[in-house]
Image (tube, helix red, strand yellow):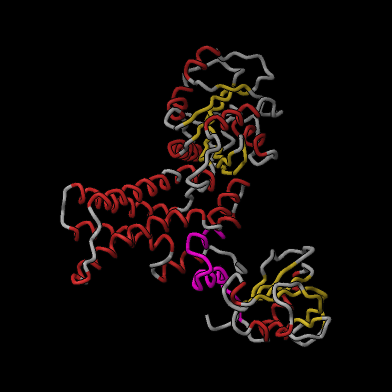
Amino acid sequence: MSDTIAAIATARTPAAIGIVRISGADTPAVVDRVFAARSGKCAAQLPLRRLVYGHMRTAEGKVIDDGLCVLFAPESSYTGEWSAELHCHGAPVVLDEVLRCAFAGGARQAKGGEFTRRAFLSGRMDLMQAEAVADLIDAETAECAQNAALQLSGAMSRGVEQAYDALMDIAARFYAAVDYPDEDIEPPEQREIGETLERCRSGLQGLLDTFRRGRILKQGVPTVLLGLPNAGKSSLLNALLGYDRAIVTEVAGTTRDTVEEKVRLGGRLLRLCDTAGIRDTADSVEKIGVDRAVAAAEQAELALVVLDGSAPLTGEEERIFALAEKAEHAVLVVNKIDLPQRAEPGVLEARFPHVVHVCAATGEGVEQIGEAVRMFYPEEAGVGGVLLTNSRQAEAVTRALRAVERAQAAVASELTPDAVLTDAEEALAALGELTGKSIREDLVATIFSRFCVGK
């Protein structure tokens, strides 16, 4: 981290404000090349953590914009090193010129996530907090943002650190008793070890139990729209989205491939997949669409079965009903209530506990689907208000949990301390990967590769 980096930290579209970030030991010198304070003071004389008014200059020294500069010392900066932000008008050409001048002053282009990576490497945050930064940027709902903000504040890290410290205390006392026999250091008692391991197991299990809900919160509920051709699946998709995303015609079989979109419904983010009408067909292209519809249904957690209420049941629906019943939750959506109804309501309600009646063409009754979703997925708090949303983290927690459980079994079987220690150290290694205390450089690079430039 010896060099100084710079990047545009805001979107590269015309906007009221745009920001260029700089970080590294030579930040004050780079700022002097780019920014001229109205007071005439150089960067070394500027007050820290206060916005200062002045001019932005091009690499040739010409004034290109009026703006603000704020300088941070290492102990108070995001990255843990000298840093600055230049606040300009958000014209892309202005930001490009300011960045070009920063490069001329000795900075280089920052890589994706490099600012946050420096914050992690300098100890300003652990790896879970760093990943929360990316989650916060990518958040698609207020709940996702709130969960990421809690992770960034260290709410999850504190629980993991408690387990890590407890296991480390056991290991350290065992080694001290073995390595310094003359010091009369008492190794931990079996009862104490058992209680510590149980606290760790309970905490890790509680955290892991939040992963399914956290994944749904972050990625959305995998939802499939199923039905016969011309039942109104695409019309319902358009109604839920609020715009015409799928082509709708009176010709059966118009949808021949899956169409995926995200929509917020019933307080939850849904990953909607509109599918081809499921039926036997000789059309090779439509058959591929039907096969993909079946595959989507088998992976879905929520099935919305769209039924043409103006047509009588024919028995062709049975295959669709059977597919829907494989999902954890299913809602039967009886469509076309603006037409005379011919579907038998008693038969439908006996098969599906949740039945709603809508007119997808006008949007009438669609809010009832949201009420069903809210019932299936009520708001729930995680451990300390935090839900685990990251697959890498979940895998590390799982490994730590299994190692703690093996250590508990070793204690219960009255095995020698070294057997307990082996499992405790495996748990410590997994928790170290979780927080970044011990992790491979290539994995760190992979994690930060998902970050945007400027963060």
Along the viewing direction, whichever of 159 and 308 lies nearer the viewer:
159
Position of residue 198 relative to residue 126, above or below, is: above
Q: Does the magenta stretch include residue 364?
A: no
Quadrant of the image occupied by residue 344:
top right
Please tell me which residue lies in front, 105 or 179. 179
Q: Position of residue 334 (x, y in %)?
A: 59, 22
Q: Is residue 334 above or below residue 66?
A: above
> Is residue 422 visible from the viewing direction of this image?
no
Report the residue at 70% width, 80% height from top. Answer: 100
Image position of 239 with respect to 176: above or below: above
Task: Tell me if residue 129 is in the magenta stretch.
Answer: yes
Image quarter (top left, top right, bottom left or bottom right) of the C terminus: bottom right
Residue 191 relative to residue 286: left or right: left
Whether residue 241 is visible to the viewer of this picture, yes or no, is yes
x, y percentage for residue 54? 81, 78
In the rendered structure, which segment of residues is drawn in magenta? Answer: 108-134
For the point 74% across and 75% down, the residue is 69
x, y percent for residue 442: 41, 70
Q: Is 318 placed above or below 413 here?
A: above
* Quarter-of-image position of residue 101: bottom right
Residues 271 and 9: in front is 9
Which residue is painted at 72% across and 83% down in the image?
43
Report the side of 375 relative to 250 (left or right). Answer: left
